Each structure stands twice: as C-alpha cells, then as structure tokens.
Image (cartoon, rainbow, N blue to C red):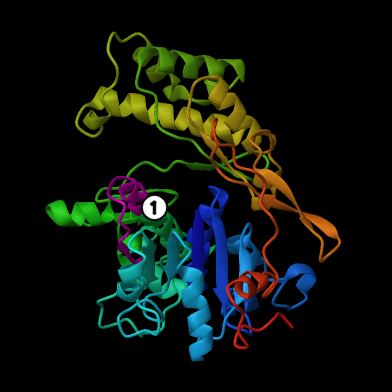
Amino acid sequence: MRVIEISDQFTGVGGRVLAELGADVIVAEPPEGSPQRLRPPFVDDTPDPDRSLRWWGANAGKRSVTVDLESASGTAALRALMRGADVVIAAGSRIGADSSPIAYQELAATHPGLVWVSVTPFGLDSDRADRPVTDLTMLAGGGPIWNAGYDDHSIPPIRGAGDQSINIAGMYTAIGALVALTERDHSGLGQLVDINVTAACNVTCEQTTYHWLVNHGVCTRQTGRHAYPVRSSPVQVRCADGHYATTGVLPRKPEEFARLAQWLSDLGLTEELPEAVFLEIAAERSTPVDIGAIGTDDETTAILGAAREAIRLIASRLPAKEYFMTSQRRGFPAGAILPPESAFDDEHMQARGFRVPVEHDELGRTIDYPGVPYLFSATPVGPPTRPPLLGEHNSILDALGGDSAVRPAP
C-alpha cells in the first residue's frame, strides 16, 4: 500500500500511523524542507532540519522526496508519483482543491481507485480556509480546552501539551483513509475524504458537545476528571512520595467494601478513619450501593463518602506506584500519574514493547522511540526506520523520469 503525503502542519501523524500499519509512506517536501523540520526541540539542542524531535515523532518509518511545486515540472513530477499511489494525504487549501495545480478530480479521472484525504483546519468548503491557525486556536475553537483545567474557575483553562490538535487530526486522517480503503475493497473506487480539524477536535470533547446538543447542558471542567454539568468527587490525591495518583471509581458491591475495610486494617489505618464503620455496614448489605442516591439517601451518602476518604487515606500513605500496583491487585481501579520519563521506563511499557531502539546511522547512535500502542497477532508491527533525511529518497522520482525541479538534498 503506497501513501503519498504532502507535508503540512496537520498531515504528519496520519501518515505515521499508516506507516506503522505497514504502508509505504513517501512524504513530499519543498526543496528547502518541510517547515515542520524547523520546529524545536532539536537533538543535542543543535538546530538542524534533520534533528527536529517533532519531525522525528511524526515521520519515523517514512521516506522523503523534495519537489518544487512552484514549477510546472515539479508539479508534473509529483503528479506522476501520485498516479502510483493508493492514498494521498494533503492539506486541501494548498493542494488537491479544484483550483490547485493538482486536483483530486483530475487524478481520479484516470486513477479511480485513489483515496485522497484532505486535512484542513476548517474543511474544504470553509470560507476560513486561508486563515492561519495554531494548535492553541484549534483546541480553543474546537472545544477541548473547555474541558481542561481545575475546579477553581478563576484559573484560566489549560491547553494540553504535545500538539493535541495535530494528533487528533492525524488519527481522523488514518481512520478516514482506512474506511475509504475498506470501501474500495468492495466497490473498486476511491473517494475524497474531507477531514475538518475543528470538527475532529469538537467530537473529541468527550461528552461536552453531546450534552449541549441533547439538552443544552453545560459541562464544566473539573480537576483531573470528566467535565460534567454537576460537580463530581475529586479523585486525585498526593501520595507519600509527592507524586499524585488517580483513585478511580468508588466501590459498589458489598464484597468490594469488605476488601476496602480489610486494606485499611492491613495498613493499621482503621482507627484514623472513624467513618470506616460505614464500610462495614456496606459490606453486610445484600445489594450493591446505588451511586445515584448520593445526596438523597443519607446511608448511601455516608457509605460512599467513607469509601472515598478511605481510598484517599490509603493513597496518601503509599508511594504512587506502590499504591497503583496494590490497588490493582486488590481489585480497585486506580492509576499513578508518572512523569513522562518514568512512564517511558515503566516495566509494563517495556514488556509491551513500547520502547523501541531505532538506529540513526547519520548520528552514529541508537535512539529509543515510543513504539505502537497496539499488538496484532497475525500481522505484527515491526520496528520503525528512522525519519528520512531531507530528500533522502529522491531516487524514487528519478525512476519516474527525473526532473531539474526535483532537487537533491543539500
């Protein structure tokens, strides 16, 4: 499966996902290189088009060609490359629209099986197509920032780090391409897939958009938990080592309350929590506790309040990782909030093959990458190749006839 990606702000992650799934992804860049190569941070803090970690993250496993789209001959070279493709990924405002040098309709006339995925900030038909955007404006306009922040609403919302709009766009790009390819298996025909990044962000607002559309309910952000029209109980607690843990959902069944009371006892904490008596009451019930009765039934409110305090007390006396592991073993969902480097080094992540060494021959060393978050029993995913150097694979174009507008890497 061959994918041609015209490198742009929102194209990289979708191409990377398809490369991980086994596609031959060729990223086409201008002769001076994609602007994404100039985004810091850089390896060893040395600015260089071949050392951008953001470029690496979105382009591992691909090949690179450089094409001058400002010239007719360069456009012809790219058109020839696209004729052998199964999928094209492009920012529609720049290329692929009817007014562009290379239009989807033109290629589809002679290549009806082509799947063209346009990924743009506002969709192909938007009158805002030419407006500049950033990750911040995408997340603010699309809605995810509304969900992100603290219970204290005097503090502004918080933008999630890591180019979240670019990742959201990339996942919808990959999904759109795969759905279109699946349909092609039946009809033999490709199609134009129009990815609207604002819309993709909007439907990635969990339940916030849904609540407004269904009942005009306004979800408000809450510290480390789901935005919702009503306030829920806090779930984060500072553990004994200073790190935080998410204490998860409350017990419901009698046997769960019995296990929680036993955990308190095993740690010698029962006397520190007078409300522990309510755990014993819940453990002796014949039916689960109905969380919907909080605030209306006194016994239910007392039981679940005691459970929350018991969990918070236990978590505060253990290191975050130990609390997480012990909680899981005892049958309670929980999670430790680890720094990125600790998560990357975690033994579970390593056992899942998430830490993958990639040889960088141009640097003379091996770099550890995060691997794929899925495992396939019949079609295992191999380790990625390093991201391509600028114009490293221009010989692909030479095989199509070559052109003076197709320049080798400097």
User: At numbered mark 1, what does the secondary structure look like: helix, strand or loop?
Assistant: helix
- Compared to residue 61, the image places residue 265 above or below, namely above
At 70% from the left and 59% from the top, the residue drawn is 386
- Compared to residue 277, the image places residue 220 above or below, namely below
Residue 185 among those drawn in magenta = yes
Residue 141 among those drawn in magenta = no
Q: Residues within 10 Å of mark 1 (few under 14, many from 20)?
A: some
- Compared to residue 193, the image places residue 312 above or below, namely above
Q: Identity of the amino acid at label 1?
A: Ile
The answer to whether one can see residue 124 in this image is yes
Q: Quadrant of residue 245?
A: top right
Residue beneath disc 1 = 175
Question: Percent x, y for residue 182?
Answer: 35, 47
Q: Quadrant of residue 269?
A: top right
Residue bounds of the magenta highlight: 179-197
Question: Percent x, y for residue 321?
Answer: 64, 35
Question: Percent x, y for residue 310?
Answer: 48, 27
At 55% from the left and 73% from the top, the residue drawn is 28
Q: Horizontal placement of 126 versus 368: left or right?
A: left
Question: Percent x, y for residue 117?
Answer: 38, 64
Between residues 143 and 165, which one lies in front from this camera angle? 165
